[in-house]
Amino acid sequence: MVKEGLESFRGKQVLLLQGSVGPFFKHLALDLQHIGATVHKINFNGGDWFFSSHNAINFRGSLEEWPQFFTDFSEKHHIEMIILFGDCRKYHRVAHAIADKKGMDIGVFEEGYIRPDYITFEKFGVNGHSQIPRDPLFYQSLSNDEFSILETAPVGSTFRYAAWWATLYYFYSALLYPLFRHYSHHRPLNLFEGVYWIRSVWRKQWYRYKEFGMQKSLSTTYTKQYFLVPLQISTDAQIVDHSDFRSVEHFLEKVILSFATHAPKETLLVIKHHPLDRGYNDYTTYIHKIANHHNITRRVHYIHDQHLPTLLENARGAVMINSTVGLAAIHHNTPLKVCGTAIYDIEGLTYQGSLNQFWNQSSNFKCNRELYNRFNGYIINYKQINGSFYRKLKRSDLECGIIWSLSTSNM
């Protein structure tokens, strides 16, 4: 479904559920209609409505009413495929289970496994629900054509576009809440979402000043003497659904305890905040409290916007729940310990022992570069689409602004 491109949707009855913030799904509907698909859309809140296409209906019932509504709608319109963004949202989980039971095709969009130039599109599920093979033998059996990467069009910065779309989406979600009062979102709906993005910009400048010289120190004085811990967004499904951690704080507590108890005394722990969570959360006080409790305050550093490739190249190892940073770590030959469920947590690519052992054994771990090249090429060719949800590629001839190449159509 991602070697024939959009052609694989020709003549089908397609239902779009929630998309990314912004007009991506609205434009995708136009592309699907252009190739002969019949497209339906269901809106769940004011943000969905604002960015919806003309052939859309509003679901204003409760979550308890959603299963029957989805079942009736899909049967009435003979839906053959549902497309959604993220498979862990409450309404999507329900629809996914019903669609799977009824034999419908399921297409799931998600932020790119490999960034910044790709978005993810998989059949059935993504991340922890992905059907991507985890057996190294699968990748070793690939032909050269299956993992040779084609030319990619650069996306460029998407921050201001994403900020604008998110501001509009959450503004209308909050403004029209009375019309969708039964809707349950995966994070609070705030009429003043733009305030968080403004605060994010302000904090970025403040952290740049506050952390001046930190990157130079880590890449010179402390090179190979620190472990990097990239954090997730606080509401990320990687924490809520694909890990055993209750929250970012719970993850920090476990990692800092393990580091204090088992890591070599000369090493540092460098915790990096997620850039898209900058305007919402600040873990400075919490990290200081936990580090102080374990008497390692001087060994723990909390940073924000340092250059990630440089951090990875100079780190002794990296620890994370599940993040696209994981593939970047493997790319830079940084020993990696995954604490959640990740598509790349494969023997030969990541450290398979316990976190407590990792601190002392990371230096002995060597990534299988051939396996990585084959895995990386396969993911790009079969699970990634060149483009962005938030800005259009100039080279794209699609309304949604992505390059849906031949190789990314075979799901």
Image (cartoon, helix red, strand yellow):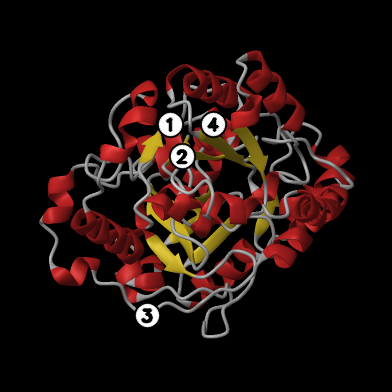
Tag of residue 13: none
Q: Quadrant of the C terminus?
A: bottom left
Kindly identify the amino acid type of the residue bearing the numbered disc 2: Asn
Where disc 4 sits, the SS reads helix
Q: Residue at x 33, y 43 (%)?
A: 103
Kindly identify the amino acid type of the residue bearing the numbered disc 1: Gly
User: Which comes before the other along the chain, label 1 or label 2?
Assistant: 2
Q: Residue at x 56, y 49 (%)?
A: 218
Q: Report, in whole angstroms, how far the alpha carbon at label 1 lies from the one at label 2.
A: 6 Å
CB atoms at circles 1 and 4 under 8 Å apart?
Answer: yes
Residue at which label 2 appears:
322
Tag of residue 151: 3
User: Viewer-proximal residue, 179 or 77?
Assistant: 179
Q: What x and y, as percent, mark residue 186?
A: 67, 35
Q: What x and y, as percent, mark residue 374?
A: 22, 60
Tag of residue 239: 4
User: In this rendering, would 58 be left or right of 144?
Assistant: right
CB atoms at circles 4 and 3 under 8 Å apart?
Answer: no
Q: Report, in whole angstroms, how far the alpha carbon at label 4 lies from the one at label 2.
A: 8 Å
Residue at which label 1 appears:
340
User: Viewer-proximal residue, 261 or 128?
Assistant: 261
Where disc 1 sits, the SS reads loop
Q: Report, in whole angstroms, how far the alpha carbon at label 3 lies from the one at label 2.
A: 27 Å
User: Which comes before the other along the chain, label 1 or label 3?
Assistant: 3
CB atoms at circles 1 and 2 under 8 Å apart?
Answer: yes
Q: What x and y, as percent, mark residue 184?
A: 71, 32
